[in-house]
């Protein structure tokens, strides 16, 4: 079961050194959205790459999400 909008969603979670949640964000629509890789960007944000059925022009499309640092509070 999803914690976001649809069947599967992308979930980004930041924890401190003790494992306590600092913040979390969910990305996705009504269908399957899957993350395959995430990396921190030079500006303190994150780049997520995956696949989406929610926002696709066909069956499955590439899903690229840029998370801006100022939105992570």
Image (cartoon, rainbow, N blue to C red):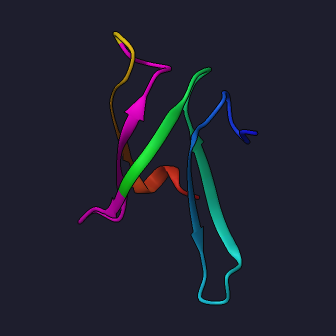
> For the C terminus, which image quadrant?
bottom right
Q: Quadrant of residue 40?
A: bottom left
Which residue of the protein is positioned furthest toward the left in this rendering?
42
Residue at x-position 48% and y-position 40%: 34
Which residue of the protein is positioned furthest toward the top in this rendering?
57
Residue at x-position 65% and y-position 70%: 22
Q: Is residue 73 left or right of residue 2?
A: left
Q: Is residue 61 left or right of residue 5?
A: left
Which residue of the protein is positioned furthest toward the bottom in this rendering?
18
Percent of width and height locating residue 72: 53, 56
Q: Is residue 48 magenta?
A: yes
Compared with residue 30, is residue 24 higher up or lower down, i.e. above or below? below
Nearest the viewer among 54 and 69 is 54
Q: Quadrant of residue 69?
A: bottom left
Residue at x-position 37% and y-position 58%: 38
Residue at x-position 67% and y-position 89%: 18
Nearest the viewer among 13 and 34 is 34
> For the N terminus, which image quadrant?
top right
Magenta residues, as a range? 38-56
Q: Is residue 41 left or right of residue 27?
A: left
Percent of width and height locating residue 61: 33, 24
Compared with residue 26, is residue 32 higher up or lower down, i.e. above or below? above
Compared with residue 36, is residue 50 higher up or lower down, i.e. above or below? above
Q: Is residue 67 magenta?
A: no
Percent of width and height locating residue 31: 58, 22
């Amino acid at each position: 079961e999803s914690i976001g909008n649809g069947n599967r969603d992308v979930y980004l979670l930041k924890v401190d050194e003790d494992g306590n949640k600092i913040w979390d964000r969910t990305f996705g629509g009504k269908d399957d959205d899957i993350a395959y890789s995430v990396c921190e960007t030079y500006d303190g944000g994150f780049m997520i790459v995956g696949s989406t059925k929610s926002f696709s022009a066909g069956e499955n499309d590439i899903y690229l999400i840029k998370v801006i640092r100022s939105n992570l509070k």
